[in-house]
Structures are given as structure tokens and as C-alpha cells.
């Protein structure tokens, strides 16, 4: 027994540090192998490669496989106790699947045809190997990104940098020969990638004629990643597949996704992904049911079209595969349900994931209440007055008012103008659709340059306000707009507290809302001023419309985007990035934060009015 204790002491004192170093080296090699695998797959599918290059890529994939096997085997052999605690069940399943790839190495291919031979062929198949390695690579990189949070790095800066990295990767992917019909400049590629990741929809080229099917797949993946948020996806993969993370990591991720507690953190991430996939799937089926057999497409093309536009609408991106966006003649007659489905997807994506989670809680409450009635035949007459939380009430009311006012205003000013010649049903459908798009999808069924000035002003205010917080929409957000209006009402009424629905709004909410509005106006003024100098041929209204659309990640344009010079395109792309990451978030990542002091200066009054 003494010898055993001495061995443990010797191991902890002398061997364990070397084990840590060895595993650290393997972790670095695994990160490098993950990146090389993704780069290799991109090169293989983005370029036309020779036989020699294909052979070299196969050697690269084989090397990545060896690195992953070595990393997992060393962890199990040297630190089995820690590995057993940190690995989740799904990680152990992936580990088992990785070890199954050794079967074709150890055993020869069975000569007798049957199930055993089919299993051997499957385990030796290239698709199985690459799919498994690709999944492990994504999970490994996700876990590495989340671990950065544990190093006390500024979370706001990590969020901004993660978006920037995805934008740069998307830029490279869209420049691949197989992504475009006849090539694309790096400025336009960067612009389209930024517009997709920031779910904006502004395009400097004709998307329908520029990109191939591969290009559209890349664009829709960028839209999905940008809509959900890079940290949301990476945090989900890291926590769901790779096991436990540090407490600090979980606290930071909780703040990013607005979870109520650490216990509900993973469930919140699951709800976000679950709601997204469920709504996009339902939207795809609804769109397909309307366009089926009417657009000259086969079944696969119809489903691809429906999926693309469902994702683009829910993520409030505004990209379309059709020439002329959604104003294409194939859609403009007899497809009112299509425009309604797109509008509903835009609204659901724009109200925010916390509201969707609140909806889920409300529905489950009523289901339990009804189920209790079926079991006991006694109706519970008590009412739960706080089913709708304060955030949900404010977002739903403001969203409803903006949609009603926007629809009525657009119908009023365009009834006998842009809507001339349409039936009454078509006019109201187009009015509702065009009131939904500025918040903040950017689809277009009409030439916006032909709209009246009054309608364009309605567009501007709707674009500037945007959608709900923690949503796929942009703008200053309806939450901030509502708080600013409520604060204004309180000032006009002479009350010291800002109250609504029996609740007093926190001082921090009022400060951040006012700061967001002021910063939005300040950034817009600077960019409008600079672009008006760079583009003297464009009117001030056109430049303002373009800048508001960019910072609010809308994507609507007065046909000015393709006319912009390279410098102006880069400025508009920067506006889209700032709008997607968030003004406050970006500033928190750049400006050094001042520590709270325990003293206070004497208060002073500034003369107002």
C-alpha cells in the first residue's frame, strides 16, 4: 500500500507535468489538423484538381485521421479519470465511431458477400471518414473558441472577431472558381460575404446571374451562421458534444444568449436551434405548397428554392435566387400566400428568440392546465398574470403597431401609384409584405426607386427601428425604441420613474437605450457625410437610404449599391458589420472599461431648455 501511494506521489510530482505538456502539444496539433482538413475540403470542392493533387489531399486526410486517433487515445490512456468526467455521451459515441475506422485497417475485406462485407465497405468508405473527421474538426474548433472565454478575454471582442473571421472565410469561398459563373472581384466578394453573414441582403452584383449552385450553398450557410450567431453555434457544439466547460465560460455564454440561469443554459441553446430549424422547416413546406408546379422547376429545384428563401426570410437576410428578387414576374401574380409566408417568417425571426422561448412556456402552461382538466375534470380557474414577461409584451405591442402603421401608410401612398393595376387583395398583400421587409429583411417585390418620398420615409423609420433584441433582425431594436419613447413620456409627464405594465424600467435599460439611439445617429451622420463626398452623383436621400439599410442590416436599396465605388462599398460593408455585431457590443470590445469607483462627485445640474 505504501509503494502504491509512493507511485501516485511520484506520478503527480514528476510524470504529470510531462503528461500535461504532451497533451497540450496534441491539442495544438489537433487544432491545426482541423483547420487543414477544412482547407483541404474547400480546395477540393472549390477548384478543379488533378489526379496528383487528389492524391496529396488524400494523404492530408489520412494524416488528420492519425492526429485525431492519437489525441483521443493519449487522453484516454494518460488521463482517463479526467477524460471520463469531461467527455459527454455524444463525445464517447463519436470516439467509438472513430475507432471503428480501424476495423478496415486491422481486418481484410471479407470475401463472402453479405452484411459483414457491406459494413466493412461502409467503414472503409471515404464519405464516412470525411464526414466523421469534419464533424470532429468543427466540434474541436468550437470547443477551442469557447475555451478562449475562460482566459478572461473580452467577450464583446471575441464576438466581433468571430463574425469578422466568418466574413473573411466566406469571402474566400465565394471567390472559388466553382462558386461563380465568370469570377468576382475581391471587393464584391467581401461585400456579398459581409451582407450574408450580417444577414443584410445588400448586393453589389446580380446574385442570380453571378453565383452557381455552389455559390448559393455557401451564401445560405453564411446566412444561417450569421443569423444564429457564431457564438451561439460554437457554444452549443462545445457544450452539447464536447462535455463540460469552465464556470466562467458558461457565465459569458449565458449573458450572450440571455439565459435565465446556468441550469437552463444548454436548454436555451437547444431551444434557439430547435426553434430555428422547426420554423424554417415549416416555412419551407409552406412556400413549396404555394409554388409547386407554377415556376417551371422540378421537385428538387422547388425544394431547394423553398429552403433557401425560408432560411433567408427567417434570418432576415433578404437574399433571393431569382432575377429581380421577389419582384420576379413568376411570383407577382397568383402567389399572395407566398408573400404572406415570407412576411410571417420575417416577423418570427425578427421578434427575438427570448420571445419564442416565452411562447413555448405559455403553450406548455396551457397544455398542462388542459391535461389536468382531462384527468380531474376540475377546471383550474386561477389566472397566471405573468405568463407574458415584460420584454415579450413590449416587443409584441411595438411590433404590432409598426406593422399596422407601416401597412396602412404604404397602402395609402402607393394604392394608385406603385400598386396601380393590382387587385385589392394584391394591394393589401404587397402593403403588408413591404411593411414587413424593412424590419429587417430587405426583400423587394417593387422597384423602391419608384416609390413616393412619403413611403421611403416610412421605410427609413422602420429600417432604423428594426426588430427585437436577441433576434436575427437589426436596427436599434424595438426594445430600445420603446424604452426611449417611454422615458420621453415620463419626462413630459414630470414623473421620476419610467413605468409600464406595473413594472419600473431599470436605470441601466434606460441608459443603454439612450446610448444606442445617440450612437446610431452619430455613426450614420459620419458615414453619410463621407459617402456623400465619395459619391457626389448620388442624391442625399439615396445615400441616407443606403446607409440606414446597411447599419440596420435590412438590405433594401434604391438601386445604388452596384453604382458605388470600391471605397464606398467597403464603407457600406463596415456599416453592415457594425450593425450586426451591435454598436454597444462593438464599443465594449474596443474601449477600455473603467472600474466602478466607491466614491461619488457632488451632483450638478445642466440647464436644459
Image: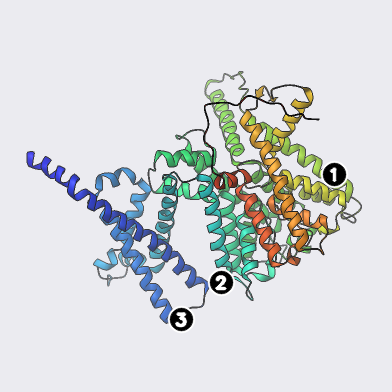
Residue at mark 3 to residue at mark 2: CA–CA distance? 16 Å
Residue 188 location (% of width, % of height): 65, 67
Identify the residue at horizontal 60%, vertical 68% (top origin): 213
With respect to residue 260, does 129 lie above or below?
A: below
Residue 462 location (% of width, % of height): 76, 45
Judging by the rendered image, the residue that carries numbered circle 1 is 409
With respect to residue 56, does 426 lie above or below?
A: above
Residue at mark 2 to residue at mark 1: CA–CA distance? 44 Å
Judging by the rendered image, the residue that carries numbered circle 3 is 50
Could you say which disc has been placed on residue 61 in the image? none
SS class, disc 3: loop
Which is closer to the viewer, label 2 or label 1?
2
Residue at mark 3 to residue at mark 1: CA–CA distance? 59 Å
Residue 107 location (% of width, % of height): 24, 67
Q: Which residue lies furthest to the right in this view?
A: 416
Identify the residue at horizontal 83%, vertical 59% (top origin): 539
Q: Which residue lies furthest to the bottom in this view?
A: 51
Judging by the rendered image, the residue that carries numbered circle 2 is 176
Q: Which of 332 and 475 is in front in this view?
A: 475
In the picture provided, is 6 more to the left or to the right than 281?
A: left
- Mark 3 and mark 1 lie on one chain; the one further toward the N terminus is 3
> Can see residue 308?
no
- Mark 3 and mark 2 lie on one chain; the one further toward the N terminus is 3
Residue 180 location (% of width, % of height): 62, 72
> Can see residue 254?
yes
In the picture provided, is 25 more to the left or to the right than 451?
A: left
- Mark 2 and mark 1 lie on one chain; the one further toward the N terminus is 2
SS class, disc 1: helix
Amino acid at each position: 500500500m505504501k509503494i502504491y501511494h509512493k507511485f501516485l506521489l511520484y506520478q503527480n510530482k514528476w510524470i504529470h507535468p510531462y503528461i500535461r505538456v504532451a497533451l497540450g502539444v496534441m491539442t495544438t496539433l489537433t487544432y491545426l489538423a482541423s483547420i487543414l482538413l477544412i482547407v483541404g475540403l474547400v480546395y477540393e470542392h472549390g477548384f478543379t484538381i488533378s489526379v496528383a493533387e487528389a492524391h496529396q489531399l488524400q494523404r492530408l486526410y489520412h494524416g488528420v485521421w492519425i492526429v485525431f486517433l492519437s489525441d483521443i487515445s493519449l487522453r484516454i490512456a494518460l488521463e482517463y479519470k479526467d477524460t471520463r468526467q469531461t467527455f459527454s455521451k455524444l463525445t464517447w459515441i463519436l470516439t467509438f465511431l472513430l475507432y471503428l475506422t480501424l476495423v478496415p485497417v486491422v481486418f481484410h475485406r471479407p470475401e463472402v458477400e453479405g452484411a459483414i462485407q457491406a459494413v466493412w465497405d461502409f467503414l472503409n468508405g471515404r464519405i464516412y471518414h470525411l464526414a466523421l473527421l469534419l464533424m470532429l474538426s468543427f466540434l474541436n474548433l468550437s470547443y477551442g473558441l469557447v475555451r478562449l472565454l475562460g482566459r478572461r478575454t473580452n467577450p464583446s471582442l471575441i464576438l466581433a472577431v468571430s463574425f469578422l473571421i466568418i466574413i473573411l472565410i466566406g469571402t474566400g469561398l465565394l471567390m472559388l472558381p466553382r462558386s461563380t459563373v465568370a469570377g468576382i472581384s475581391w471587393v464584391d466578394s467581401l461585400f456579398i460575404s459581409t451582407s450574408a453573414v450580417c444577414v443584410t441582403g445588400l448586393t453589389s452584383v446580380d446574385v442570380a446571374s453571378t453565383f452557381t449552385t455552389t455559390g448559393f450553398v455557401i451564401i445560405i450557410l453564411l446566412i444561417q451562421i450569421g443569423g444564429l450567431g457564431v457564438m451561439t453555434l460554437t457554444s452549443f457544439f462545445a457544450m452539447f458534444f464536447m462535455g463540460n466547460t469552465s464556470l466562467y465560460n458558461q457565465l459569458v455564454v449565458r449573458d450572450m444568449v440571455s439565459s435565465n440561469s446556468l441550469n437552463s443554459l444548454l436548454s436555451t441553446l437547444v431551444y434557439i436551434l430547435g426553434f430555428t430549424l422547426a420554423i424554417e422547416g415549416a416555412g419551407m413546406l409552406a412556400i413549396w405548397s404555394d409554388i409547386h408546379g407554377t415556376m417551371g422547376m422540378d421537385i428538387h429545384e422547388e425544394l431547394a428554392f423553398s429552403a433557401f428563401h425560408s432560411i433567408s426570410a427567417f434570418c432576415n437576410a433578404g437574399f433571393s435566387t431569382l432575377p429581380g428578387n421577389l419582384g420576379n414576374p413568376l411570383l407577382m401574380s397568383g402567389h399572395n400566400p407566398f408573400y404572406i409566408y415570407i412576411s410571417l417568417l420575417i416577423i418570427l425571426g425578427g421578434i427575438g428568440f427570448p420571445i419564442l422561448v416565452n411562447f413555448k412556456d405559455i403553450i406548455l402552461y396551457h397544455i398542462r392546465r388542459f391535461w389536468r382538466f382531462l384527468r380531474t375534470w376540475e377546471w383550474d380557474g386561477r389566472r397566471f398574470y405573468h405568463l407574458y414577461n415584460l420584454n415579450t409584451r413590449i416587443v409584441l405591442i411595438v411590433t404590432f403597431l409598426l406593422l399596422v402603421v407601416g401597412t396602412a401608410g404604404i397602402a395609402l401612398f402607393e394604392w394608385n401609384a406603385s400598386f396601380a393595376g393590382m387587385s385589392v387583395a394584391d394591394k393589401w398583400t404587397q402593403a403588408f409584405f413591404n411593411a414587413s421587409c424593412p424590419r429587417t429583411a430587405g426583400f423587394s417585390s417593387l422597384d423602391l426607386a419608384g416609390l413616393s418620398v412619403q413611403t421611403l420615409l416610412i421605410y427609413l423609420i422602420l429600417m432604423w427601428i428594426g426588430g427585437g433584441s436577441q433576434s436575427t433582425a437589426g436596427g436599434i431594436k424595438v426594445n430600445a425604441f420603446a424604452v426611449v419613447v417611454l422615458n420621453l413620456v415620463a419626462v413630459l409627464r414630470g414623473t421620476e420613474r419610467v413605468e409600464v405594465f406595473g413594472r419600473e424600467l431599470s436605470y441601466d435599460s434606460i441608459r443603454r437605450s439612450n446610448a444606442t439611439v445617440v450612437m446610431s445617429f452619430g455613426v450614420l451622420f459620419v458615414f453619410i457625410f463621407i459617402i456623400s463626398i465619395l459619391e457626389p452623383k448620388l442624391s442625399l436621400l439615396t445615400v441616407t437610404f443606403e446607409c440606414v439599410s446597411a447599419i440596420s442590416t435590412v438590405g433594401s436599396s434604391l438601386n445604388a449599391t452596384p453604382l458605388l465605388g470600391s471605397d464606398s462599398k467597403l464603407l457600406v460593408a463596415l456599416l453592415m458589420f457594425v450593425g450586426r455585431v451591435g454598436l454597444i457590443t462593438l464599443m465594449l470590445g474596443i474601449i477600455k472599461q473603467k472600474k466602478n469607483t466607491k466614491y461619488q462627485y457632488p451632483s450638478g445640474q445642466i440647464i436644459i431648455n
